[in-house]
Image (tube, helix red, strand yellow):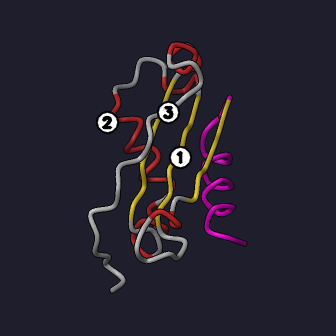
Amino acid sequence: MSMKQQIEQKLAAGIQCKHLNVVNESHMHSRGTDSHFKVIVVSEEFAGKRLLARHRQINELLKDELANHIHALAIHTFTPDEFAQHQGQAPESPACMGGSKFD
């Protein structure tokens, strides 16, 4: 199973997603391995939760991947209404600043 599939599986199992998109952005960075990802998660579960609580929920679900496999994870969490206000788009990820805990 690829890292992208593993992330998708864990998020889908841990959150009732209306929309889930996991983007492997590793090709945009110097290392080139499956170490840079962006996740876009849309769920009713996020209603009433602050951004920090939403991100903590994602981080908890992916704690093994973050500790052992992923160098960078861009997290974009929305309720369905928020996602509609953003016209179904998440911001572009910034360029990598270089370096890796794996180097």
The magenta segment is 1-18
In the drawing, what numbered circle is on residue 90? 3
Provide the secondary structure element on which disc 2 rests: helix
- Where is the N terminus found, in terms of image quarters? bottom right
Work out how far the residue at label 2 is from the one at label 3, CA to CA, in angstroms.
17 Å
Image coordinates for residue 52, horizontal then vertical, percent: 31, 36
Q: Which residue is mark 2?
A: 52
Label 1 environment density (alpha carbons within 10 Å; few <14, some 14–19, many ≥20): many
Query: In the rendered structure, does residue 17 fall within the stretch colored magenta?
Result: yes
Provide the secondary structure element on which disc 1 rests: strand
Query: In the rendered structure, does residue 59 fall within the stretch colored magenta?
Result: no
For this rendering, which residue is in front, 84 or 68? 84
Q: Are marks 2 and 3 in contact (CB under 8 Å)?
A: no
Circle 1: residue type:
Val
Secondary structure, magenta segment, majority class: helix
Q: Is residue 14 above or below residue 29?
A: above
Q: What residue is shown at x 44% (from left), y 53% (from top)? A: 60
